[in-house]
Image (cartoon, rainbow, N blue to C red):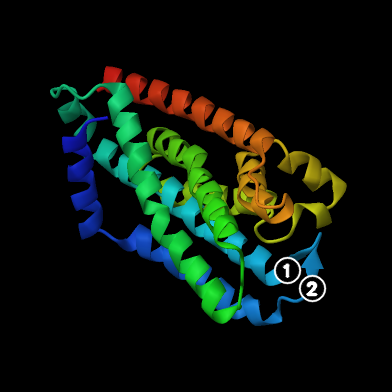
Amino acid sequence: MNLTYLRMEIRRLARNRRVLVFSMLMPAILILVFGSSSDGELNGVGAKTYLMVSMGLFGSMSAAIGSGGSIAVERGLGWNRQLRLTPLSPGRYVLSKVVLSLLMAVPPLLVAYLLGALTLDVRLPAGTWLLVGLGSWLGALPFAALGVVIGYVARPDSVQQVTGLLYMLLAAFGGLWMPVELMPRLMRSIAEYTPAYWVGQVARSPLFHHGHLSMQALAVLLGWAAGLGLVALRRFQADTARA
């Protein structure tokens, strides 16, 4: 990873905060709107706790996958041609973008958990809070890589529409709007083949498995992240080769 390039990207993000603000604002609004009416339990987990974790995932997912928009704009401006003149390797470029996306995923999670504790009265053991946060944060990995892929596939004038449609679909199949257990059988079967499903399994596993992360779900999630990361690397190499 190139620290100089990463610092430059962080400064650019500080000047253009729209993606980050949206990723924090939407989960916050949804928690405030639906939190008061969320009653009951799902397999022993309160509906308000489930909502809090799901909205945190939604925010971190949208922040991570939103990197595709900036990449598409960079391509349109010819930024890749400039990168070819630097020592920055494809692997370091993709890794820097993924790390930046992981940093962007932190504020939405913090906002969701803060609102969950203050407005929904969610109470969890300290270890469970930590594991839920860690699992949710790691869940941004495949979406960070997916954002890079989208940035090199979509056109600058359509990347926002593609990104928005994709993460709304992934959010649905990941159980963020409705628990996967309550979905029709066909949707449930499709959901298990999406990265969002496994992100949800990792993030919620401490709630259902007595304070432990599901190692099976974590392994699948990391597999998705590695696979999408490889695709992102190939797309970057192909795009710079044409530049």
| The one of 10 and 151 positioned closer to us in this rendering | 10
Left or right placement of residue 185 versus residue 229 in this view: right
Which of the 4 image quadrants contains residue 224?
Answer: top right
The residue that appears at 34% across and 31% down in the rendered structure is 95
Question: Where does the N terminus fall, quadrant-wise?
Answer: top left
Q: Residue at x 69, y 54 (%)?
A: 175
Between 39 and 21, which is closer to the camera in this rendering?
A: 39
Kindly identify which residue carries mark 2.
Answer: 40
Which amino acid does the dot numbered 2 rest on?
A: Gly
Residue drawn at (45%, 68%) of the image = 111
Residue 9: give x, y in percent of width and height. 23, 45
| Percent of width and height locating residue 180 | 76, 52
Closer to us: 212 or 74: 212
Residue 78 seen in the figure: no
Q: Is residue 31 left or right of residue 160?
A: right
Residue with the most extreme left position? 85
Residue under pointer 1: 46
**Is there a contact, CB below 8 Å, between mark 2 and mark 1?**
yes
Q: Is residue 41 above or below residue 77?
A: below
Quadrant occupied by the C terminus: top left
